[in-house]
Amino acid sequence: MNESNELRVEYYGGLFGTLLPPLIFISGVITLSLMGAPDERGFWPILILGLCVGLLLAKNKDAFCQSVLDGMSQPVVMIMIMAWMLASTIGVLMGLTGFVEALTWGANQLNFGHTMFVVTVFFVCVLVSVSTGSSFGTILICGPLLFPAGGLLGVHLPTLAGVIIGGATFGDCIAPVSDTTIASALSQDADIGGTVKSRLKYVVPASVLALLMYAISAATRSGELLQLPPQLDANPLALIMIVVPLVIIHLLLKKKHLFHGLFYGLIAGVITALICGLLPVDKLLSLDLDNFRANSFIIDGINRAVGISFFTILLMGLVSSVKASGLLEQLASFSSEKIETARQAEGWILGSVGLIVMVTAHSIVAILTASEFVRQAGEQMSINKYRRANLMGMVVCTFPFILPYFIPVILMSNATLAGADFNIPAISPLEVGLHNYFSWSLMLVTLFAVITGYGRNSIPDSESTE
């Protein structure tokens, strides 16, 4: 069988047959989200249906199957699944040690109101995401800790989920170490430092607008400030568990592998919790002989990650089958023939990258797929390399963090399950995306920039000579 990048899958029905499987998936996820799907497990049958339809419509069944398997077996998929499992395990550990209650107690001691808490959460997540360059890592670290704490304080839950993913999106968009920043810059032969500097003119206004929206939403839609109920009496000593996210962030800043940081964070957390008497030894591992099973917080953590893990595997298989059709390359070629002005070129760049990212559900795949078209269209209309890189980077930081079938949104929704231990309801992917005011604001700023030309000529063309 040929390698995945040589596979070509043709479908009965032409364009309609190619697009039908992803359309089934997208429409199904949106429908389930509107109906209040409890978690990403509800999306499994929709993905299976999309894959079945794709197989039926594929002219070469073997090529289709191989493209699906190639997509599922990518190293990035395994990296994400291991990250989900380790982060979920750490989240369970932090819950068992009472860190969430202690964090809530600390916020009460500081007299944090709803607005102040939400604004603080935004800046905390921005700091983590800019430092690590990872929206996934930020959600994994901050979501299971800050969401329950804010929920206990009575903060409006969708706003709380939205501000966490919004802060995570910020770093993904502009951090020099973010894969989005690196891919968008290098794909246009732009230096990363210049790209980050030029991107500030878009990200800063979007952040100010988003902060205003978060503050208004928190101030007007939150409930009464809650006191800790008796069964949640906090042990201030549990605040020492802050060592866990600090260890993880420190190692990521030192450019260590994500697994390295998560494993060391887990080890540091277990040792700290045992020494301080915050974790009963039987929570590490105990045997339930009557029911023939083992119990451990590690097992509980991995179980929490099952939903998003299988969602990721199935989704990447479906995406790979669409990519193997060659449709995305055809789209870029078609677009290049319709450009007559700089505004039109930028409009086609936004539309093409946006459509590709919505079909592939992967930001970096979208950037790399569209990069040559973006370069050609931009050079044709004398759009400098920083502007081109910024348009691509901003587009992929909007849709993937808003629409309910993208992994970051699903991941944030999954992180809200950490509130179940405190009777705090989870937030659906649809609500998470609707309340990611940073991505909505970034979308408005991006459209404004294209329509009005804001920032288009801020860097002389001579500086972007290829």
Image (cartoon, rainbow, N blue to C red):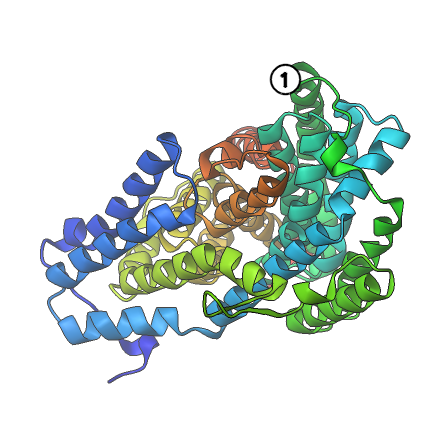
Q: Which amino acid does label 1 sit on?
A: Arg
Quadrant placement of the C terminus = bottom right
Quadrant placement of the N terminus = bottom left
> Mark 1: few, some, or many residues within 10 Å (few <14, many ≥20)?
some
Along the line of sight, which residue is nearer the eye, 39 or 437? 39
| Image coords of residue 164 (percent x, y) | 65, 40
Residue 76 lies, with reference to residue 84, above or below; the image says below
Relative horizontal placement of residue 216, taking residue 339 as reference (left or right): right
Could you tell me which residue is drawn at 10 percent across and 67 percent down? 59
Visible residue check, residue 376: no
Visible residue check, residue 100: yes
Could you tell me which residue is drawn at 83 percent across and 60 percent down? 277
| Image coords of residue 345 (percent x, y) | 45, 43
Instruction: Kindly identify which residue carries mark 1.
Output: 221
SS state under label 1: helix
Q: Residue furthest front?
A: 290
Relative horizontal placement of residue 415, taking residue 75 as reference (left or right): right
Q: How many labels does the image show?
A: 1
| Image coords of residue 302 (percent x, y) | 53, 63
The quadrant holding residue 3 is bottom left
| Image coords of residue 299 (percent x, y) | 55, 65
Could you tell me which residue is drawn at 74 percent across and 29 percent down? 229
